[in-house]
Amino acid sequence: MPPVRVATVQYAVGQNVEQNLTKCLRFIDLACAPADGPKPALIMLQELCNHPSRYRDQDHAYEVAVSIPGPFVDAIAARARTHATHIAMNATVKGPNPRVFDTTILIGPDGKIIGTHEKQYLFGHEGECISIGRTPGRVFETAVGRIGLYICQEGLIPETSRCLAVEGAQILLNPLNSGGPDEGGLHVPVRAAENHLWVISANNVGPIAGGHARNFVGGSEVVDPMGRVVAHASETEEEVVYATIIPEQADDKRVGRDNDLLA
């Protein structure tokens, strides 16, 4: 498999779902028109693209959640097809009324959904209106490599990513909605290094209304199998960053082989 060009996107999400979709589509188009280098074969979007994780009540959480299929997801799938690229997006998704699930959706370049993952380890207030995921994480075979999905808080413990590594993942995708600099500075690189695989994260930016910190901390990044950050976004700006990865470098788990990555 040849090297894979990837992009990770970060921007501020507001309270209006339709406006958030418009912004999401704009950043996908932006990611597919780089100033230099080839168009990415994989685009990573942040956690909760549809609405921040603060709700008036359970009915509000259900109201702003998206459906599969539905206008929000279908529009992003259409963009994946238009640009012939993989897109990983995350949103709250409607389950049996009034339950919603924090869900990552991996879409192929043909616009079809390759697979999904529902967050199982919720952060603080999220459990008030978001339900725990119903199925364990899976690894999906794609044209750009074997991809495992995990979400934000799940990356603060080693078990989630380790299970995906044991299942053969080469690339882990980690959407964030975090005001904690420890995720990008510690947990994301550690998950890559301890499992010897690639991790791509995408975080939110902007203020957190009534949240666990004053602002989201950005810092979306691409990390190689040695835990080295090879692409990194700012803490405050809406932007797209790119990297070229070699998924097969995650296949050799033998101790002492890390120097091969320095060649």
Image: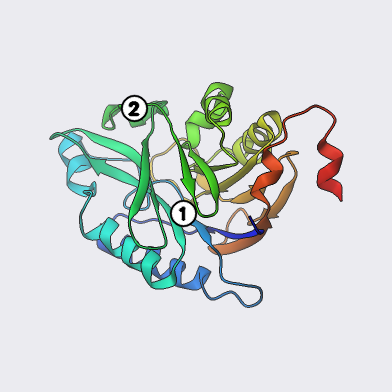
Q: Amino acid at mark 1?
A: Leu
* Circle 2 crowding by C-alpha within 10 Å: few under 14, some 14–19, many from 20: few
Q: Amino acid at mark 2?
A: Thr
Among numbered discs 2 and 1, the one appearing first in the sequence = 1
Q: Is residue 255 left or right of residue 81?
A: right
> How far across and down, in percent of the image, does residue 257 sit?
83, 34
Q: Identify the residue position indicated by label 1 in the image.
A: 45
Q: Picture coordinates of residue 113 (x, y %)? A: 33, 51
Q: Is residue 82 left or right of residue 220?
A: left
Residue 224 shows in the view: no
What residue did someone put label 2 on? 135
Estimate the x, y position of residue 116 in percent, counting from the top left. 36, 41
Q: What number of labels is visible?
A: 2
Q: Residue at x 56, y 27 (%)?
A: 156
* SS class, disc 2: loop
Q: Give the residue at the far front of this rendering.
A: 1
* Rendering colour mode: rainbow
Q: Position of residue 151 (x, y in %)?
A: 46, 37
Q: Quadrant of residue 233?
A: bottom right
Residue located at (40% from left, 28% from top): 122
In the displayed structure, does residue 240 sit left or right of residue 192?
left
Using residue 199 as the reference point, say whether residue 126 is left or right of it.
left
